[in-house]
Amino acid sequence: MKRILVAEDRPASLELIRTVLESAGYEVIDAMDGQDALHKAGANSVDLVLLDLQMPKIDGFGVIRQLRNDPKFNNIPIVALTASAMQGDRERALSAGFSSYIAKPINLAALRSEIERLLNAKGDSDAGNREIF
Ligand code: MN
């Protein structure tokens, strides 16, 4: 079973994402802030990470900076979740090393298909860096 780490500080959003991903057959590890995300990333083997950009303690940019410096995480898909659909944030996310970017409110069908695409594309070095919008 593929394991996904989901870091999102809003409990209702986290539960919604968890429900959707579990019903799609993934195992979900959740984190409520950036520090929790780094702790759980270090303690578990995961296949993909979903990171809210705006989180307490350490934001999504701070989390991905540390993850991409870790050999365990420098090659796995990491997807940004953000409330902002601003073009600048999208570009900033991709240049920070995110594999792709999903704007809130999250389109759940698009989230599922994007995760499936990224997990299936593993090993294709070019496949991770594409936006879904
Ligand atoms: Mn947030």
Image (cartoon, helix red, strand yellow):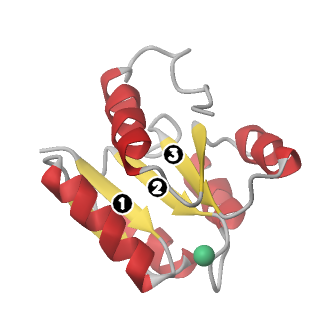
Q: Secondary structure at mark 2?
A: strand
Q: CA distance from mark 2 to mark 3?
A: 6 Å
- Could you tell whether 108 is left or right of 126 in the image? left
Visible in this render: residue 70? no
- Could you tell whether 73 is left or right of 28 in the image? right
Q: At label 3, which amino acid type do we have?
A: Ile
Q: CA distance from mark 2 to mark 1?
A: 6 Å
Q: Is mark 1 within 8 Å of ligand 1?
A: no
Dot 1 alpha-carbon crowd within 10 angstroms: few under 14, some 14 to 19, many 20 or more: many
> 27 and 108: which one is in front?
108
Question: Disc 2 vs disc 1: Cβ atoms closer than 8 Å?
Answer: yes
Q: Residue at x 36, y 34 (%)?
A: 113
Question: Disc 2 vs disc 3: Cβ atoms closer than 8 Å?
Answer: yes
- Could you tell whether 49 is left or right of 130 in the image? left
Residue at the spot of label 2:
50
- Could you tell whether 100 is left or right of 40 in the image? right
Whether residue 127 is situated above or below residue 56 in the rendered picture:
above
Residue 76 in the image: state x and y as whole percent.
44, 38
Dot 2 alpha-carbon crowd within 10 angstroms: few under 14, some 14 to 19, many 20 or more: many
Question: Disc 1 vs disc 3: Cβ atoms closer than 8 Å?
Answer: no
Residue at the spot of label 1:
5
Mark 1 / mark 3, whichever is N-terminal: 1
Residue at the spot of label 3:
78
